[in-house]
Image (tube, rainbow, N blue to C red):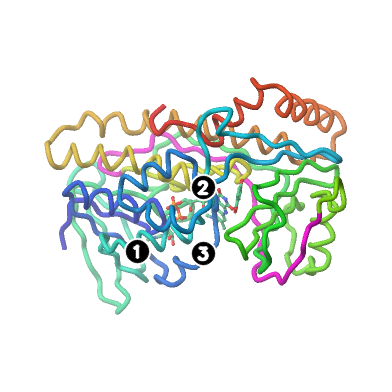
Amino acid sequence: MRTQVAIIGAGPAGLLLAHLLHRGGVDAVVLETRSQEYVAARIRAGILESSSVELLESAGLGDRLRAEGHEHRGIYLQMPGERHHLDFVDLTGRSVWVHGQTEVQKDLVAAGTAEVHYEVTEVGLHSLESDPYVTFVDSTGARHRLDADVIAGCDGSFGPSRAAATPAETFERVYPYSWLGILADVAPSTDELIYAWHPDGFALHSMRSETVSRLYLQVPNGTDPADWSDDRIWAELATRLGDGENGWKLTPGPITDKSVLPMRSYVQTPMRRGRLFLAGDAAHIVPPTGAKGLNLAIADVALLSSALVALLREGDSRLADRYSDDALRRVWRCTHFSWWMTTMLHASGDPFDAQLQLSQLRWVTTSTAGATGLAENYAGLPLAL
Ligand code: RFL
Ligand code: PHB
């Protein structure tokens, strides 16, 4: 087999890259270990920032987003007894959209532009400095060799590309807490997301649609979701989100999914080795507090697709040579913002930290300068920084 770009991983980074390359006249083949159904059903990120929305629209993927997604002007930031609205549109002219990662994934599959081989095994990356190729076993057990001009590692934090892209410098921060996330068949109790600071730990009220809510609680690392009954989860959410304060009510409902998410920051540089380019979670992980994971994957792929079209259609390597540096500017901005949101909102157990957090939150919610900084990072980063 031969293609121009062998893409490892059919998450949002891999499928969007295949779609953008197709539109640019470059062939690609995507290899994915999981089944199509599994990938489509994975519950993950929920928020698209404005530059991601613009990119998806310009790639012909905006119809369902516009029709079924929900535009939010901003978020609520909360401390006990007080809830403040940050209006990103007033502050920066930019909004965010609730359109879950599962929906983006569905839109990409529906576009039908990517040749994807699902349920492959034994994926190996070879000869990365020149004449690269990928070996794999397909779902029938047949062995293949896929030769390519370039390999794109879009296989997330557990795939083989990250390790293949060494020697590399790695940067990591592991946080001393996790998120217990639930999906519930109940209308959201809020019109926009609520990020709540609370002495018992952070809570977030998000949503997927008019009838499905997504909520999170800060929990200790190593928490077993089985230790959290539905009643316990709703009681804790009610406390931390301020049920009964200023007339606000949290409406509980049937929980359809419950999982624990560890929190980590990770960056691997450079995002390239020879003919292997990394994009998305394969190169970097952010804690979800800034809603950046999916948006960063989209931004990487926007840069990488232009670079590969120039390289493979015109023999122009300038963008490809700059790809890692260009992508990393945004990656580090988002890494900082995600760390900042995380450390501002999660209880550490240290009273000094708590007072600094409250002071910071008061500044962000009362100063136009503070609020604008948050809004710009959350909603308004341009694709290229
Ligand atoms: P993905 O989505 O992880 O896709 C990588 C794909 O590669 C496949 N793969 C392989 N394919 C071939 N060969 C191999 N050897 C392979 N090994 C792995 C995987 O099966 C998968 O299909 O990475 P991508 O495309 O870079 O997209 C990044 C985003 O998915 C990610 O940043 C966000 O979802 C992060 N994230 C969240 N972000 C948020 O903003 N809010 C959230 O609530 C949120 N929840 C999450 C998340 C990430 C999670 N992961 C990765 C553990 C919840 C989870 C569970
Ligand atoms: C989500 O809806 O899953 C979500 C939203 C915002 C975040 C993290 C997760 O910061």
Q: Position of residue 252 (x, y in %)?
A: 77, 65
* Location of residue 356 by image quarter: top right
Within 10 Å of disc 2 (Cα), the crowding (few <14, some 14-19, many 20+) is many
Q: Label 1 to label 3, Cα distance in Å? A: 14 Å
Question: In the image, which residues are magenta?
Answer: 249-276
Q: Is label 3's Cβ within 8 Å of ligand 1?
A: yes
Relative placement, left or right, of 163 versus 111 is right
Q: Is the residue under label 3 in contact with that under label 2 (CB below 8 Å)? A: no
Q: Which dot marks residue 109? A: 1
Within 10 Å of disc 1 (Cα), the crowding (few <14, some 14-19, many 20+) is some
Looking at the image, the residue that sits furthest to the left is 314
Q: Amino acid at mark 3?
A: Arg
Q: Nearer the viewer, residue 16 or 32?
A: 16
Within 10 Å of disc 3 (Cα), the crowding (few <14, some 14-19, many 20+) is few
Which of pointers 1 and 3 lies earlier in the amino acid sequence? 3
What residue is disc 2 on? 97
- Answer whether residue 122 is magenta in the image: no
- Answer whether residue 269 is magenta in the image: yes
What residue is disc 3 on? 42
Relative placement, left or right, of 361 versus 206 is right
Q: Amino acid at mark 1?
A: Val
Question: The residue tagged with tag 3: helix, strand or loop?
Answer: loop
* Camera-side mark, 1 or 3: 1
Q: Label 2 to label 3, Cα distance in Å? A: 19 Å
Which of pointers 2 and 3 lies earlier in the amino acid sequence? 3
Relative placement, left or right, of 373 versus 223 is left
Q: Is residue 58 above or below residue 114?
A: above
x 60%, y 44%: residue: 287
Q: Is residue 69 above or below residue 128?
A: below
Determine the main secondary structure of the stretch shown in magenta: strand
Question: The residue tagged with tag 2: helix, strand or loop?
Answer: strand
Relative placement, left or right, of 39 versus 3 is right
